[in-house]
Image (cartoon, helix red, strand yellow):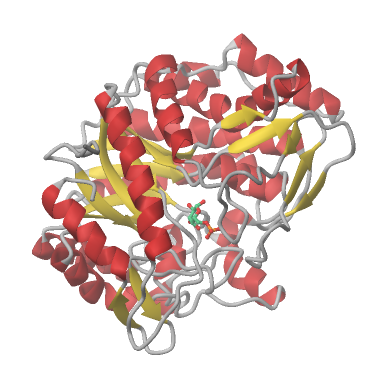
Amino acid sequence: MKKQHTLPEDFIMGGATAAYQAEGATTGDGKGQVIWDTFLVDKGRYTADPASDFYHQYPVDLELCKKFNINSIRLSIAWSRIFPKGCGEVNRKGVEFYHNVFAECKKNGVIPFVTLHHFDTPKELFDKDDFLNRENAEHFVNYAKFCFEEFSEVYYWSTFNEIYPVASNQYLLGSFPPEVQFNFSKTVTCLHNMMYAHARTVNIFKDYGYTGEIGVVHSLEMKYPATDKPEDIHAAKLDDALSIRFLLDATYLGYYTDSTWQDVQEILAANNQSVAIDEKDFVEMKRAADRNDFLGINNYGSHWVKKYEGESTLNYNTTGEKGTQVYRIKGIGERIVRNDLPKTDWDWIIYPKGLYDLLLRIKEEYSNYNKIFITENGLGYKDPFEDGVVMDDARIDYLRQHFIALSEAIEQGVNVKGYFIWSLMDVFSWVNGYKKRYGLFYVDFDTQKRYPKESAYWYKLVSDTKTII
Ligand code: BGP
């Protein structure tokens, strides 16, 4: 008989969103600008207005949550709705909006999981070098403290969404503004400064005794060697050091181990670059290391890495044209295409065991992780829409496999307390626009009408029965 996989009774079944990708109303009610407002226009791409119009549709979305037994929503506060310039004057209308959202959550029995920063630093501060500038880290901490005081109805707080993609997309791959490529000094400085800002925020949360829990959301995807040759094993280790260990060391140890630091130095040296970190930062970081209540993990796939000796070359698949992704980084390695494994149309390798391996590894290597929420996981897909019906079997299959991996990791003693599908409803994708859909609810972006996909019914059944069907 086939094994029946289950989830714990108190397991949170959520849906994830992010302010800029869902809300729309980018200039509404006194909201300050973010870099994306001008960047997307300058590039002649889509705009984030009205996106999924969550700014006005949140009662509809939260009612859908209730109806489909989605008992939590991950959302972010847009910093520039609260402080249009990043600091200084408060925009009361922005504050009121989020109070209204949280009240609606309560009404529908949906727990809000709130992220303070999801790729949307206010433009005023972004233009002053974003997190490369330590003053901006202080502005972030002040904004966070304001939110803790103001939104006492929120219990779960995450400081940042995906520090590694922020740093690497901005300064290494150049896929996010300011589109800088292969600048490892900036990448590492940004990683460190954001981790420092995270630690400062956690310490304030705990020192002031706010009610609730605080953590950080990291993008964590396993790096495996492409072969068992020592040089490929080493390449995977370097990729792992920069994208995983640097962040987890900072979060759970409060410093970088010699091994992590040496690997990062090797990458910097291969690119004739360097970085200076003030040792004093580790005092703050060490004080925060045991105070994280949870770790949020965003996971979409895994990577296989081999040695690469040429100059860095990249092609980021933003079109959904399979087989166009190229990722070769000087000083790290090449992420290869595994033709024997399934991939999305955007070339993201689907490998649920990667999630299992990752969870076991965290339990082993960072035993003070406390508890884990999968804060993003899901399938970007060109959903077929016919007469209001979306048969997204591929998504159901993706979810089923990942839930099984999760359930097996829980059986092995990893403390995973919840899962948030990316995304609750279709939202816009930063560099892929509106065609890459992830939602449980199909959004007709012209009418803003929502249609439950087949996967939404599947998700409800899992949530109702805590059985992976
Ligand atoms: C994560 C981000 C989300 C979301 C998701 C899917 O990195 O936190 O904001 O966009 O990835 O990515 P994409 O839209 O590029 O497919």
User: For this view, does 299 lie left or right of residue 100?
Assistant: right
Name the residue nearer the viewer: 112 or 11: 11
Looking at the image, which residue sits at the far top? Answer: 258
Residue at x-position 45% and y-position 28%: 357
User: For this view, does 340 lie left or right of residue 352?
Assistant: right
Task: Say whether residue 348 is visible.
Answer: yes
Name the residue nearer the viewer: 95 or 108: 108
Residue at x-position 32% and y-position 50%: 420
Judge whether 199 appears above or below 282 on screen. Answer: below
**In the picture, residue 69 is in which quadrant?**
bottom left
* Residue 11, horizontal then vertical, whole percent: 18, 41
Residue at x-position 28% and y-position 69%: 97
Name the residue nearer the viewer: 294 or 426: 426
Say which quadrant the N terminus sits in.
Answer: top left
Task: Say whether residue 74 is visible.
Answer: no
* Residue 452, horizontal then vertical, whole percent: 28, 73
**In the picture, residue 316 is in which quadrant?**
bottom right
* Residue 394, horizontal then vertical, whole percent: 43, 61
Residue at x-position 57% and y-position 52%: 343
Judge whether 224 appears above or below 77 on screen. Answer: above
Looking at the image, which residue sits at the far right? Answer: 310
